[in-house]
Image (cartoon, rainbow, N blue to C red):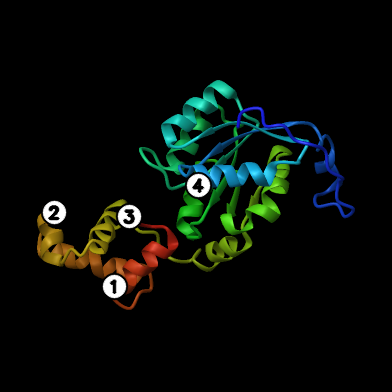
């Protein structure tokens, strides 16, 4: 898909961005697409086809390949999935921003968890968009990010606001919750982590409290939903 040819379309009659953001909007934006599923990369290409100002210059199917393509192709904007083999998208974003602090990255994912979104934004992502909005919003968000405008899915922004007062799980508690999601009892947690069973129980109780969960099963459900842990 490198060098994908595209044709010009008419600009929308109603401005989508502030006038200052429209200056230079029609200059070419070179895009790198990162997603482990070829069909989804093809879908993104189809969505951007026909946009004369957007050109896909390359694609990658995992984190290390994404970093290599980013380094060699120097895209203006990278469209990045978070869940990938070998290296997750958050770590790939962090590596890209370390190499080029001004790198512009749009997260495009199916994962709506507020904690995962916060990790991506803290790593340096400029926008966070869910894949069910790709056909209607991706092109405009790429343009906005290229102009220095940050964008985040409204539903995720609301989740972040709703959970802002919640205590954050410590790395150890995230590890414990991940193990609990795999069916570990307190006894198995103690053995796996080389701690006492009482300490394991205390960790689980603290996690339940911080997540405002009813019990350990509900805590796992909330952890998955918010992107704290993964299956």
The answer to whether residue 43 is above or below residue 67 is below
Which numbered disc covers residue 198?
Answer: none
- For disc 2, the marked residue is 192
The local secondary structure at tag 2 comes to: helix
The spot of residue 215 in percent (x, y) is 29, 76
Question: N-terminal of the two: label 4 or label 1?
Answer: 4
Circle 1 is placed at which residue position? 217
- Tell me how far mark 4 sits from mark 1, CA to CA: 26 Å
Side (left or right) of 127 relative to 18 = left
Q: Position of residue 178 (x, y in %)?
A: 28, 58
**Residue picked out by circle 3:** 170
Name the residue that disc number 4 marks: 120
Towards the viewer: 53 or 180: 53
Disc 1 secondary structure class: helix
Q: Do the residues labelled 4 and 1 touch (CB within 8 Å)?
A: no
Q: Are marks 2 and 1 in contact (CB under 8 Å)?
A: no
Q: In terms of sequence position, does the residue under pointer 2 or pointer 1 come before the other?
A: 2
Say which quarter of the image contains residue 6. Answer: top right
Residue ID at (56%, 27%) = 100
Whole-angstrom CA distance, mark 2 to mark 1, is: 19 Å
Determine whether the residue tagged by mark 3 lies in a helix, strand or loop: loop
């Amino acid at each position: 898909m490198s060098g994908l040819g595209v044709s010009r379309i008419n600009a929308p009659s109603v401005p989508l961005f502030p006038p200052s953001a429209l200056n230079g909007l029609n200059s070419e934006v070179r895009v790198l697409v990162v997603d482990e599923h070829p069909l989804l990369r093809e879908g993104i290409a189809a969505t951007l086809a026909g946009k004369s100002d957007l050109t896909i210059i390359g694609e990658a199917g995992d984190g290390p390949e994404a970093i290599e393509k980013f380094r060699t192709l120097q895209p203006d904007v990278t469209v990045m999935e978070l869940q990938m083999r070998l290296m997750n998208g958050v770590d790939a974003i962090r590596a890209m921003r370390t190499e080029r602090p001004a790198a512009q990255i749009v997260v495009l994912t199916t994962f709506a968890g507020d904690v995962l979104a916060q990790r991506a934004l803290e790593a340096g992502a400029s926008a966070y968009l869910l894949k069910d909005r790709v056909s209607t919003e991706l092109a405009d968000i790429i343009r906005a990010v290229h102009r220095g405008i940050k964008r985040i899915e409204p539903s995720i922004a609301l989740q972040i606001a709703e959970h802002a007062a919640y205590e954050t799980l410590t790395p150890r508690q995230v590890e414990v919750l991940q193990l609990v999601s795999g069916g570990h009892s307190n006894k198995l947690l103690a053995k796996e982590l080389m701690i006492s069973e009482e300490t394991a129980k205390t960790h689980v109780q603290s996690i339940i409290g911080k997540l405002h969960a009813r019990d350990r099963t509900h805590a796992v459900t909330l952890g998955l939903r918010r992107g704290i842990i993964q299956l």
